[in-house]
């Protein structure tokens, strides 16, 4: 993940596209019953964010996350073909075969989450084959890791899992605080700080990023390895302008 050369902390602002039934949607705290449809054409939305200056696009297959296998491959392929910026994809990617399939579509990075807990042998195999193209998503509810599309909460802490992931060779984490996701209340800075301090690998923040002040707050964690911030609902609701957010992430 290349970042422009700037003085001082720099956080990449990454717009999100969440897919359900082939449409671009957003949820509140991961609840499929609290769903808002923003576009019937995810590819058009991807083009829009690229035109607004996005350097990376974050895509989640919500149906895949819930069901355990990719469910929006045509939309994912359409997104990849519509834009020139790299795409990171998560949701239902549990096996090495799943990873191969979506990388074959042109996705740049694959996000594995549930398999980090439930199928660690699959994650290790994916790391062995694809190395830094594998990102682990750590989604936490009250500090504990949630899996299977956030429908189940484990007993392991997000900090402990982050340490385990670093130990097996994971180079980047995406950390989502479920309580703030889609709520536009700001990120859980202290939770993120605790994870970033526990490891020496790259961390991308997700959940609650909705104001320029949130970007500035995350930049303070850049020396700890926080390199990016994913934002979704605030962009779709118009409370955060992507161009302004990108500038806030880059400015000294």
Image: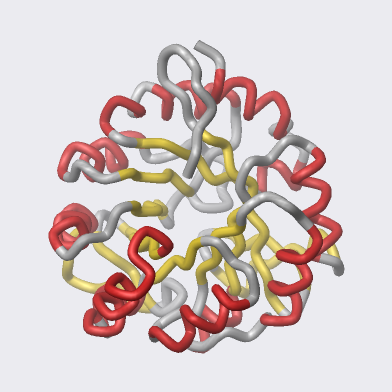
- Residue extending farthest to the front is 129
Residue at x 47%, y 39% (from the top left corner): 228
Please give the count of numbered marks on the rendered protein: 0
90 displayed left or right of 17:
left
26 displayed left or right of 122:
right
Q: Is residue 4 above or below residue 49?
A: above
Position in image of residue 233 (x %, y %): 66, 49
Residue at x 47%, y 25% (from the top left corner): 10
Q: How is the image coloured?
A: secondary structure
Position in image of residue 229 (x %, y %): 50, 40
Residue at x 19%, y 56% (from the top left corner): 166
205 displayed left or right of 165:
right
Position in image of residue 104 (x %, y %): 59, 78
Give whichever of 204, 50 is nearer the camera: 50
Position in image of residue 248 (x %, y %): 59, 21
Q: Is residue 239 above or below residue 5?
A: below
Give whichever of 78, 42 is nearer the camera: 78
Give whichever of 58, 217 is nearer the camera: 58
């Amino acid at each position: 993940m290349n970042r422009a050369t700037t003085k001082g902390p720099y956080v990449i602002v990454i717009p999100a596209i969440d897919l359900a039934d082939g449409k671009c949607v957003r949820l509140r705290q991961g609840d499929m019953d609290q769903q808002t449809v923003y576009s019937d054409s995810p590819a058009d939305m991807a083009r829009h964010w690229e035109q607004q200056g996005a350097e990376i696009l974050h895509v989640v297959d919500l149906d895949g996350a819930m069901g355990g296998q990719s469910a929006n491959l045509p939309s994912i392929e359409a997104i990849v073909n519509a834009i020139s910026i790299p795409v990171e994809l998560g949701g239902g990617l549990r096996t090495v075969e799943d990873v191969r399939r979506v990388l074959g579509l042109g996705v740049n990075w694959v996000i594995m989450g549930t398999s980090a807990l439930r199928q660690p042998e699959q994650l290790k195999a994916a790391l062995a084959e694809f190395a830094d193209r594998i990102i682990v998503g750590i989604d936490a509810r009250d500090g504990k890791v949630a899996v299977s599309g956030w429908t189940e909460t484990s007993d392991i802490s997000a900090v402990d899992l982050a340490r385990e992931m670093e130990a097996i060779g994971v180079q980047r984490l995406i950390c989502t605080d479920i309580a703030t996701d889609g709520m536009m209340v700001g990120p859980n800075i202290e939770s993120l700080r605790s994870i970033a301090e526990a490891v020496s690998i790259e961390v991308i923040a997700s959940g609650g990023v909705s104001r320029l002040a949130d970007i500035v707050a995350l930049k303070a964690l850049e020396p700890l390895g926080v390199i990016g911030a994913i934002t979704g609902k605030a962009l779709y609701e118009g409370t955060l302008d992507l161009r302004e957010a990108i500038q806030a992430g880059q400015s000294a």
